[in-house]
Image (cartoon, grey):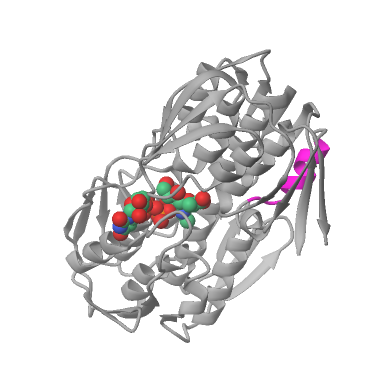
Amino acid sequence: MEKLRVEGGKKLSGKVRVGGAKNAALPALVASLMTDEPLHLSNVPDVRDVATICRLLEHLGVGVERKPGGEIITNVDHLTSCEAPYDLVKTMRASFLVLGPLLARTGQARVSLPGGCAIGARPVDRHLSALARLGADLRVEHGYVVAEADRLRGAEILFDVPTVGGTENCLMAATFAEGTTVIHNAAREPEVEDLANLLISMGADIEGAGTDTIIIHGVDSLDGAEHSVIPDRIEAGTYVVAGALLGAPLEVTHCHPPHFEAVLDKVSEAGVELTVGESSIRVTAPESLQSTDMKTQPHPGFPTDMQAQYMVLMTQATGSSIIAETIFENRFMHVPELSRMGADISIDGHTAVVRGPSPLSGAKVMATDLRASASLVLAGLVASGPTIIDRLYHLDRGYEGLASKLSSAGADVERFSD
Ligand code: EPZ
């Protein structure tokens, strides 16, 4: 079992390079189902979730060629299955994104319900209601969604609450629907916009991606394309927080600052000096941090995927910070572990109150989900004494080479097997 050992207190300087966005790469790979021509994707991060979606695509009959340096070429001569099995979907919820494309491309799909995960129940009711509006015949049996449609028909879709995956599933299904589809209250995340840009480069007719209203005019087929995945705004934000804690200064490169303005604004508000460039951010840790309240919101608000990392920053800020998690119902599982390291955090429902500054001390801790594990690494970087982080497979789902990137910036981080 691999673990991470972090010896805290080391200043961070030099550069950390941000990779491609996991949450853009996954839907981009799924879009390969919608063409029988090669799809050339670049800047794809080498993380576990990408490996998982590639396994699922190969199960469906997609040829997946992974080249060094983050390039993946997919080929679909013919699909050999329309079924996404439970043992694959349960390991990664994003697998559910194959439902829309399979249905649109073949007229049928049998996709396992993803089930819940550590951060919440994460139902897919909005995905299903959108596909039903597009004319799909859906039923749930034995834990699977069975979907059929001779030809999907354009419709007006309204999401009562924005859903990233639901918008992406609907976007791909509507691409082949007859007529025009309008998605109201669509998710505005950059990863949704990146998927739309990929589909447009393949020949789709889509307007308004990145806004809350997306219009799709159905087409009959899509061509192949070449596409570079956008930088990972959450990975970038994680390193910005590392710099806010220990930057002397730390330069975060190959990122796209406009994609995570809410994070940069909040970190600046806490007193951190940021120099924002075209595709990089220089971060200098201040003498003292100012406690600053935060509330997670759908994009362009503060992303829930940065909540745990921001909480660590607030443990080192002077005063009390109120952190409200409005997206997921159980996304404070990093709190007990941070408390064991000396953080002063109290939880009341979906709100956490962080009092600081609290000197953190290294400890043996356990990762529970992807972003919680990133927060434990950040805590280890400022803690006195060693922090040993277990269950690294959570971290490996979404961070490529985190230990080596931090070490190259001066951190004392070592990955080892016990
Ligand atoms: C995407 O998940 C991301 N994953 C998540 O990142 C991210 O936290 C989330 O969007 C919110 O930004 C990928 O893109 C692969 P949602 P998704 O549908 O699409 C509820 C990470 O760490 N909901 O926008 O599953 C849902 O339970 C991951 O990289 C329904 O109730 O999120 C949640 O409370 C974690 N019914 C809220 O909406 C539905 O049908 C937002 O979920 C769909 C969602």
Residue in view at x 37 percent, y 69 percent? 101
Q: Is residue 146 above or below residue 95?
A: below
- Viewer-proximal residue, 278 or 365? 365
Q: Residue at x 20, y 68 (%)?
A: 132
Q: Classify the position of the C terminus by image quarter.
A: bottom right
On the picture, is 276 further left or further right than 402?
Answer: left
Whether residue 285 sits left or right of residue 155 in the image: it is: right
**Residue 406 is one of the magenta-drawn residues:** yes
Q: Position of residue 352 (x, y in %)?
A: 44, 34
Magenta segment range? 399-408
Where residue 133 sits, quadrant-wise, is: bottom left
Q: How many marks?
A: 0
Query: In the rendered image, which quarter is residue 285 located in?
Result: top right
Q: Main secondary structure of the magenta part?
A: helix
From the viewer's side, name the closer residue of 27 and 390: 390
Residue at image position (66%, 23%) is 283
- Report which quarter residue 201 is drawn in: bottom left
Vertical placement of residue 413 versus 43, above or below: above
Magenta segment: does it hold 177?
no
Q: Residue at x 62, y 24 (%)?
A: 316
On screen, residue 399 versus residue 136, left or right, reads right
> Can residue 197 be spotted in the picture?
no
Q: Position of residue 220 (x, y in %)?
A: 31, 69
Judge by depth and name the residue closer to the eye, 413 or 171.
413
Does 367 appear above or below 9? below
- Note whether residue 94 is visible: yes
Q: Find the residue positioned furthest to the bottom.
A: 80
Vertical position of residue 383 compared to residue 50: above or below = above
Q: Where is residue 137 shown, x and y percent of the image?
A: 20, 77
Quadrant assignment for the N terminus? bottom right
